[in-house]
Amino acid sequence: MNSRLTRLAGAAMALTVSLALTACGGSDDSAEPAAGATASGPFEYKDALGKDIKLDKTPTTVVAQSSVAAALWDAGFQVKGAYGELKPDAAGKLSYQAGSLDLSKVTVIGSTYGEFDTEKYALMNPQLLVDYTFDNKALWYVPAAQSEKILSLAPGLAVPGNYKTTDEAITTMVDLAGKLGADTKSAALTTAKTDYETALTAVGEAAKTSGLKVAIMSPGADSLYVADPVQLPEGNSLKNAGLDMISPENPKKEVFAQFSWEKATDFKGADVILVDARTYDAAKADLAKVPTWANLPAVKAGQVYPWYAAAPYSYQAYSKIYSELAGQLKTAKKLG
Amino acid sequence: MQPQTIRRLGVFVVAVAVLGVVVVLSLMIGRQAISPGDVLRALAPSAHGDNADIVRGLRLERTVIGLVAGLALGGAGALMQALTRNPLADPGLLGVNAGAAAAVVTGFAFFGISNGFAQTGLGLAGAAVASVVVYLLGSGSRSAATPARLALAGTALTAVLFSYINAVAMRDQASFDQLRFWVVGSVVNRGYDRLLIALPLIVIGIILALLMTPALNALALGEESAHALGLSVGRARVAIAVAITLLCGAATAVAGPIVFVGLTVPHVARILCGADQRRVIPMSMLLAAGFLVLSDTLGRVVSGGAEVQVGIVTAVLGAPVFIALVRRRTLVAA
């Protein structure tokens, strides 16, 4: 009964809002400077699923997965709603995956994987949904069971989940933000881009002087997962900058190769290990008890730094990530 | 000595020898090829380096945990089948696995307990509470707890608890990750500290189990005959149920739910030893320990890529053996 009431109230509200909108002739939209007053349409985009998305007017009520939303936000387009990894930690802080999203300006539709409040979404009168696709079939964080309903409310736009380099990834996001009406020539974005390039150069310089070998890993209780940098945009960008990245043997064109903990000793050549920032802190104490992990030279030397997996593809986010890494690489020592 | 006694003793000697071979294999075989000589050298307490990390650090630990968990599960399974006089009885039937998992998931989701040591304690407590509840449900009203009622109560509680676990686990990703371990058992990197809290309980469970074997023999004759033989049926049942809970709860808390060990192994033990529980229970423990350690060893090398968890290997090996047993002969419970 309760949900029926909410739905009724929602329908009534939606009706009022749309009446108000027609009455004002959409003047509400142009009064909102953040949501891209420049472009009014039409909006056209060929997405990663091969779908041509055509809208008469540039959508203003856009809802996106948190990483995508954060990337668009940094590129100058503010989404109205977001879903994804948006649960604050004990200190009330959002994960790095949410970038600089300001939740006071964004409606949260879901705050973890598998969570999507379809009713709340419908009440927003969404005009466009944006998410990654990793399999070229489905939208990453849109729950399969609800997807039909969700996609009937507004078209779903898929941006690729994987890219050759972070440059390519960020360009894609900036391009989309521009099409949605953001000012992609803004001074802030230009500065961010310069910072990003400077940070990547700094990584290259640190790499050249030290000759450090770097591996990307996601250590679990039962097995060790080693990422193949060639399959990661940041891996390729770092490689191109001159960093010596370790690939697992016989790579299978997958991001992760799963290894028995006995095989961890094969990675003794790594001077620096970048670990999955999503899970490392929680697993740290248990990992210290795994002898083949604890005795890896990089672990012993304390040269284990976070790998910000699934960080938003923006110049701002990655200039921070790369300059942090450049600093770490400068202090890290060549081992063995 | 009677020839029969010699034969019985021989079966045990062979079982212990097989267990020894399995343990040696478990130390020798793994994803990283290490020669037998190097394995022996790595076992020395003074040894350091990669081989020591792998053999003494990883393989020895998982072997010890597999051994202890196997002993406990084999004992619990045999006790369970004898107590309920049901050849299909499994330690999971008393709600022990579900109780352990429910306690761990609750602790994590509502109180943020993610420390492995604390989780083992929670798992044990959950297993104990679940079996007490099952016992109370099974022995409600005027009649005593009969095997069938216990099994029904256990099944019902398990269903309730798993609904609860799913509801909690679906709340968020982190809880779901915690639950994963409670779906498939594993002996990798469990840590000796977890074993340490479980070990005293397993030792008490094993002693209690061995003490109760004569009572089990009496119970096999039926409740009335057992009574006539001077056995306090109710008290014996409680003692056996306590042993099962200790053994199964502790094993589950250390290694997660491992299926088909407690179900299949006691049948093999009865084929080898006959119906006398004084021999079936210890034989079942020995065989289960060997089976578990062997399954874990196989799981390390059986696939081309990553290792396969022991909980999956025991199911893959145990299920066909169990089906073959069921088809071959009428199953005897006690």
Image (cartoon, grey):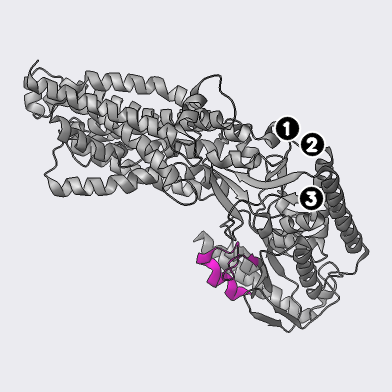
Residue B34 visible in the snapshot: yes
Q: Mark number for residue A301?
A: 1
User: Amino acid under label 3?
Assistant: Ile
Drawn side of residue B149 relative to residue A160, left or right: left
- Label 2 residue SS: loop
On the rendered image, what quadrant is the N terminus of chain B found in? top left
**Residue at coordinates 56% horizontally, 34% vertically from top-left?**
B113
Residue sticking out furthest to the top: B1
Span shown in magenta: A132-154
Label 2 and label 1: CA atoms lie apart by 8 Å
Q: Nearer the viewer, residue B53 or A276?
A: B53
Q: Are marks 2 and 1 in contact (CB under 8 Å)?
A: yes
Of pointers 2 and 1, the one earlier in the residue sequence: 1
Which of the 4 image quadrants contains residue A168? bottom right
> Magenta stretch: residue A18 in it?
no
Q: Are marks 2 and 3 on the same chain?
A: yes
Q: Nearer the viewer, residue B2 or A111?
A: B2
Residue sticking out furthest to the right: A187
- Location of residue A12 with respect to A111 vertically, above or below: below
Query: Comparing marks 1 and 3, which lies closer to the viewer?
Result: 1
Label 3 crowd bin: few (<14), some (14–19), many (20+), radius 10 Å? some
- Location of residue A44 with respect to B97 vertically, above or below: below
Q: Which residue is mark 2?
A: A333
Q: Chain of mark 2?
A: A
User: Amino acid under label 1?
Assistant: Ala
Residue B70 visible in the snapshot: no
Label 2 and label 3: CA atoms lie apart by 20 Å
Of pointers 2 and 3, the one earlier in the residue sequence: 3
Q: Mark number for residue A321?
A: 3
Of pointers 1 and 3, the one earlier in the residue sequence: 1
